[in-house]
């Protein structure tokens, strides 16, 4: 027991010293006259981070507060058939989950990241038909596949 307490204390001391010794990065001022070459970026939401909508009605089946915390039929409707040839075409991807709301509770999911990329100069576009100047592409996918 004494050895475990000593180990925890040593680990905390090392973490504290590392945090104390870390320097805050100084912002670099960009030259306003320099051309801004932005490398295109493809943003891929994490597993289960893409909204799934019904293809015929557009109703969200995954990606809003209700579907995440109180799914209809315990989420069995989202399950895919076991045979790979019977692909489920009832649901289609509808972009990343941006935020969740439950009464006064609000949780931003991918919105802060996408907003900060756009503030940094990225221009949101479509992977299907990119236009000149678009540099941020969101890859929506059916995470069940």
Image (tube, rainbow, N blue to C red):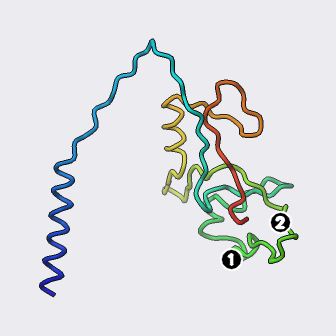
Say which residue label 2 marks: 88
The quarter of the picture where the C terminus appears is bottom right
Q: Position of residue 135 (x, y in %)?
A: 61, 32
Residue 89 falls left or right of residue 75: right
Say which residue label 1 marks: 74
> Image quadrant of residue 70?
bottom right
The quarter of the picture where the N terminus appears is bottom left
Q: Position of residue 65 (x, y in %)?
A: 60, 61
Residue 67 falls left or right of residue 17: right
Question: In front: mark 1 or mark 2?
Answer: 2
Does the residue at mark 1 contact the one at mark 2 (Cβ under 8 Å)?
A: no
Q: Position of residue 126 (x, y in %)?
A: 71, 37
60 shown above or below 88: above
Q: Count all numbered tags in the image, as a single digit.
A: 2
Say which element carries label 1.
helix
137 shown above or below 84: above
**Residue lying farthest to the top in this orientation:** 33
Q: Position of residue 107 (x, y in %)?
A: 50, 54
Q: Nearer the viewer, residue 90 or 40?
A: 40
């Amino acid at each position: 027991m004494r050895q475990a307490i000593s180990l925890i204390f040593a680990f905390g001391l090392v973490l504290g010293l590392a945090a104390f010794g870390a320097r805050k990065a100084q912002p670099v001022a960009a030259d306003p006259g320099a051309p801004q070459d932005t490398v295109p970026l493809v943003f891929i939401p994490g597993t289960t981070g893409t909204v799934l909508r019904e293809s015929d009605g557009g109703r969200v089946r995954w990606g809003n507060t209700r579907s995440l915390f109180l799914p209809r039929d315990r989420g069995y409707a989202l399950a895919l058939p076991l045979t790979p040839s019977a692909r489920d075409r009832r649901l289609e991807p509808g972009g990343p989950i941006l935020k969740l709301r439950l009464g006064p509770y609000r949780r931003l999911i991918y919105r802060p990241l996408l907003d900060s990329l756009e503030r940094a100069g990225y221009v949101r576009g479509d992977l299907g038909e990119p236009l000149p100047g678009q540099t941020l592409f969101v890859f929506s996918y059916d995470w069940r596949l």
